Image: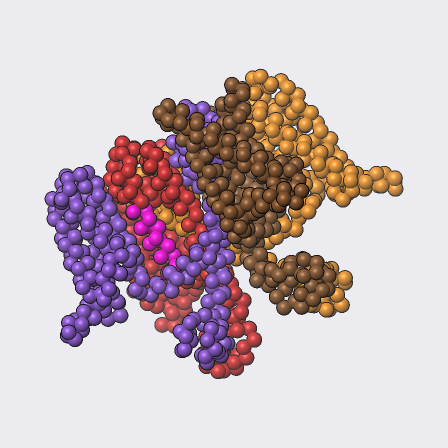
Chain colours: A brown, B orange, C red, D purple
């Protein structure tokens, strides 16, 4: 069994890790394939290209699907607990990257499912997980997670403003200006408070314009709140990182010790 | 009188507090009812839904109103000073949540008042007051209140810019481009400085476009000012919280002592 | 001469200062008059109001002008160096607040000058100068002045991007899409990079949309730069203020001493 | 050979440096010429001006080109290693500033190349390199470079959101609303997430509006992330600058020593 195991662990190092030259090469080729396949999906949706090169794109698409299928099988084979991989978020994304093409072959009405292939893009984040960006990504996620509670209050506030002022403008404005229902007016309020401003719906009465001005200035001003929250949390994360070293305790393996700490604060072992 | 009082204090714990399991369940049910009733109000405003399901929505609306009325009566009964509750902001909102439906039944022209029922959404903030979000909400309100003075100067500056440049563009631009009066031109200036940009009114002359460009770049740049104010205040609030403990003085009950303080700085008692 | 002088210094205290009750009352009345006169100017520009109430608005306008003229004369009389006042920024604004109405009476074509009356709004800032907002205003101006150099580099960068990418899109796009000249295309690039997005001019070709996407993402991302600059400067200003007391040296009168300073760092006197 | 060399070094001081009065004067004249020539290029693209003053603009353009050509030759002559200059970024920009005019004279179809002359604007940054803005520019570039990794993760996230949600809305919305292909829908998603909002393409179905609202709120909220990153990095750069002196080691010439350092941390020499 040893040689098989050896063969499997080598394959695992190539596919799941990126420390060996072969692992790095695999990552780069995969990144190139993913982005190419996304471009093919996008081009195929353009009527002009579909008419002219539809056949070629169809063939290329099948090549991509077969390559990704082989990759999926290799991932299953080279890992110890295949089911854990299959049910992991990345396992599901990897499956979603190949299923739509097969489905479109079997079921006739499944053509629209082909759009799902753009979910392949999420696979790019797997490559990120492996390389140098990992500490930056951790930093960003910690700062965003820490500010999540404050930001959820902010979002609830924005949603309340949008529902209430959307309803008020529905009362004030005529249906001819596009404010045909409360949901429609709330949609307009979101378009306005986020300063997007399509202009497909716009107030026509003086009172409506007054309320609209209020929503705009509110949206313009309160943008400062999420920014302030995230900036403060990031500053805290930077300060924490400066104060605490990245060295793990040699006994318990926990991190987060201060730079001048001599003993592990979790297990008391000498660092 | 004791048993009654006991019954009242139990009801008070369920309705006004959320520490008991019954109190938590009450909060969750109420939250669900509020959001459902808002959805019903919104759907009823869509002509398509009103025609098809208007009758059902009417019945559901009355069920909500009766439930909220019972809740309002229970709130009155279970509190010691009912008038204080009635006149409190939340008491007024609770009343506004049920009055429009009754009014639409009595007065014929009061149909449009039904939109006021979306104010029920404000009741959601009551649930916030009770749970874990309270310290986050305090943090945000302290930071925003502290920056209010600086932000009011900023708002006055923006309003002045908008009135003056709105008047200038009224002089420069033709009425055909939509700049029919100064208030209209000021409205356009607000749409532009907040970077909303509907496009229903847009300058046509070269000079007008020049002024518009100036307003846009100004609005784009000065967004930094409120953000800077709020971020600085939040950083100060974080630093204050880090430096000062949350422990209250056992004698006078005041908070805000520094971490290494041994005596209360307000009454001199040992902490 | 003494009584006259006394009479003048009393008037000076009322008009130019706001510490006495009479001075405060004068400020409030003036604030009310300025805002009322602005509203009259704005209403008069609306065709509907002008037709209906034009005569009344004309009379009210003259009353305002006469009141402001009397105020201007009183300001001249009560100050020691009238010419210094006349040539000061606020003196010029005060004059501009009354001149257009007289000019429209004398010269026939000067009707459009009446719009200049909105410059009266700038007089509101005089009241700000007097009251509690002064320290907040100083804080904001110091932070903005300190960041001016960095921001001017940012503005030069944005202007270069806008001119160069505006010219590129002029090459790429057709005249039919609205890109009729380089200045017009630069205007569109400003509308896009500031995320205003009127939609009166929009790219039609694929390459044009690609460039537009780049400008949008650039404008969306680099907004972080001025915000970062202003926030950093504000944090520095806050830190400086925390570290340095507001007490002036009793001998040389200079401020900016650290809280624990015992001797003036400029003249060596004991604080 | 000495006198020639002397003549060359004098010319070098005028053209490449700005410490002598002649060098400063040269910089100011050049700045004025660059901006004037940009204005001429822009005006010439306006049909109205081209028809009226096209001949004059043509002559002026040739004068600018000849002056810039002379300047280019003088730069070549006065520098020790001309090839290094020619291949440097500024050398290429300087050449691009004169080539299009000559090409339009030789080749008939090269008229559109004339737009490239706006690249002359990049020459303005050369003047920046010489004067007081250098330390500010360094500060900004350090902060932006340090945050580049975190921002690239952010950009990858935004691009993924835009491709995936653009594809989803392509499925949901009709072709009549303007969502004719996935690239077109992705373009719309970029217009929406950056809060530009042209309004040339806008969702018509309820589900489409729901997704659009989500993209808008997302784009509105996540603007906080790049701002937070850049602000944190700027604060770090400010702190570093406060802590470290600008004095270079007298032996090894390296900078970045702390204020209280007595010995160079790179070579051990006394500072």
The residue depicted at 66 percent of the width and 36 percent of the height is: A83
What is the x, y in percent for residue D48? 18, 39
Q: Is residue A267 left or right of residue A110?
A: right
What is the x, y in percent for residue C141? 43, 60
In the depicted view, which residue is nearer to us: B193 or A203? B193
The residue depicted at 67 percent of the width and 57 percent of the height is: A254
Q: Is residue B238 left or right of residue D253?
A: right
The residue depicted at 48 percent of the width and 58 percent of the height is: D233
The residue depicted at 46 percent of the width and 67 percent of the height is: D241
In this orientation, does residue B63 appear? yes
What secondary structure characterizes most of the magenta part?
Answer: helix
Query: Where the C terminus of chain A falls, by quadrant?
Result: bottom right
Image height of B178 relative to D98, above or below: above
Look at the image and give the residue range highlighted in magenta.
C149-164
In this orientation, does residue C119 appear? no
In the depicted view, which residue is nearer to us: D169 or B47? D169
Image height of D211 relative to C110, above or below: above
In the depicted view, which residue is nearer to us: D170 or A136? A136
Query: Where the N terminus of chain A falls, by quadrant?
Result: top right
In the depicted view, which residue is nearer to us: C168 or D30? C168
How many discs appear? 0
Q: Is residue C175 left or right of residue C13?
A: left
Q: Quadrant of residue D125?
A: bottom left
What is the x, y in percent for residue C22? 47, 59
* Magenta span includes C157: yes
């Amino acid at each position: 069994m040893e040689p098989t195991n050896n063969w499997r662990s080598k394959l695992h190092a190539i596919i799941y890790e990126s420390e060996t030259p072969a692992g790095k090469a695999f990552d780069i080729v995969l990144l190139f394939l993913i982005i190419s396949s996304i471009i093919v999906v996008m081009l195929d949706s353009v009527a002009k290209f579909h008419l002219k090169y539809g056949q070629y794109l169809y063939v290329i698409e099948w090549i991509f699907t077969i390559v990704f299928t082989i990759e999926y099988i290799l991932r299953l084979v080279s890992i110890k607990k295949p089911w854990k991989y299959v049910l992991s978020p990345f396992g599901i994304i990897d499956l979603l990257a190949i299923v739509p093409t097969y489905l479109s072959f079997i079921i006739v009405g499944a053509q629209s499912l082909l759009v799902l292939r753009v979910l392949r893009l999420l696979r790019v984040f797997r490559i990120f997980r492996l390389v140098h960006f990992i500490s930056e990504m951790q930093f960003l996620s910690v700062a965003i997670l820490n500010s999540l509670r404050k930001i959820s209050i902010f979002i609830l506030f924005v949603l309340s403003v949008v529902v209430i002022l959307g309803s008020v403008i529905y009362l004030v404005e005529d249906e001819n200006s596009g404010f045909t229902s409360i949901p429609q007016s709330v949609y307009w309020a979101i378009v306005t408070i986020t300063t997007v401003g399509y202009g497909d719906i716009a107030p026509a009465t003086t009172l409506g314009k007054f309320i609209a001005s209020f929503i705009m200035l509110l949206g313009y001003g309160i943008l400062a709140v999420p920014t302030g929250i995230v900036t403060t949390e990031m500053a805290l994360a930077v300060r924490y990182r400066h104060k605490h070293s990245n060295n793990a305790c040699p006994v318990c393996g926990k991190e987060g010790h201060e730079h001048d700490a001599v003993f592990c604060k979790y297990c008391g072992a000498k660092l």
